[in-house]
Image: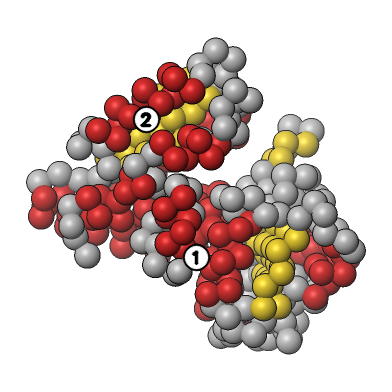
Amino acid sequence: MPLTAADNPQRTEKLLRAAKILERMEPQLRQEIDRLRTQYGKGPHLRILYFGNHPPAILFKNAQLEVARRLHIEAGDRSCDWDHDGPDQVKQIITQWNQDAHVHGIFVHQPLPPQLDAQDISMLIDPQKDVEGIHPQNSARRFFARARIGSCTALAVMELIDEALRRSGDTLEGKEAVVVGHSEIVGRPVGMLLLDRLATTTVCHVATKRLEEHVRRADVLVVAVGKPRFIKGAWIKQGAVVIDVGINMVGGKVVGDVDFDAARERAGYLTPVPGGVGPVTVMMVMKNTVEAFKLQHGAA
């Protein structure tokens, strides 16, 4: 059965808007940060590295700086030249931040220029400062469900799914979950987190045959492929929870990977784009920064 039904009287709003989740999370996180600042005489410090004039990365970076300011997290950013800065320059920056005891979290924006390898860059970051949750050590801990710092986007996806569960009064256990996209920062970690919650999970990718058939079975559908309106509304199971991670520019507008207008007619719960996964991901970066601070200070 889907997580929600069309005649469920408790389902008053099918859009999973980030604003409602942040209203709950932000005061709790700010309170914890203020407590840590009182206890240790200092608070978390985040550093952000981004490349070139890439509008989505700049928007995300600016949102991170604004949320950090509201939460009383010290934060700073540094840009690298897309065409000219290579592995040596990036390694120097990250090594400096790794060695700086004042810096507790490091976030490197993607996409990366072609002269840089994402896996190589992720391995440069101190795993205790890896607030995106992409270092191999953190990925391995996630496999055993022991990671204190998880993939920030994957954690945001799960928070939005949990919001739908709170509204519906249902659980993930035994539900059909389908993830479209198997990237290391979204699809794969989301798949692991869904498995941890005992959802029957399928991860689809570029070689998947009959994608539509997989999507039609999904009680929970997570899409992260970077293709505008790739998932058709007619494919959505009636009452399904649909989490759209995609951010695409079409005609000057930001759209997701799901055909939103058509999907809205069938989904039980659905994230808007913008205003869904993105802002919650920013908050998860901050939550991971706090967790990194606690790890580095031996706090539980």
Q: Quadrant of the N terminus?
A: bottom right
Residue 87 disc label? none
Dot in front, 2 or 1: 1
Judging by the rendered image, the residue that carries numbered circle 1 is 143
Mark 2 vs mark 1: which is more N-terminal?
2
Q: Could you tell whether 166 is left or right of 240 in the image?
A: left
- Identity of the residue drawn at 57% across and 32% down: 117
Q: Residue furthest top?
A: 84
| Residue 66 in view in this figure | no
- Give the residue drawn at x 77%, y 45%: 227
List x then y, in percent, for residue 280: 50, 54
Is residue 180 among the parts visible in the rendering?
A: yes
Estimate the x, y position of residue 285 in percent, counting from the top left: 42, 49
Which dot marks residue 94? 2
Which residue type does callout 1 highlight? Phe
* Viewer-nearest residue: 98 or 253: 98
Q: Label 1's element? A: helix
Amino acid marked by disc 2? Ile
Q: Is residue 192 left or right of residue 180?
A: left
Q: Which residue is found at the position 77% from the left and 64% from the top?
A: 264
Q: How far apart in space, not on screen, are marks 2 and 1 (Cα)?
A: 26 Å
Q: Position of residue 259 (x, y in %)?
A: 81, 54
**Label 2: element kind:** helix
Splitting the image into 4 quarters, where does residue 233 fall? bottom right
Quarter placement of the C terminus: bottom left
Q: Establish if 247 lies above or below 62.
A: below
Q: How many marks?
A: 2
Depth check, front residue: 89 or 262: 89
Q: Is residue 166 above or below residue 49?
A: below
Find residue 150 and report its horizontal and vertical position in percent: 44, 57
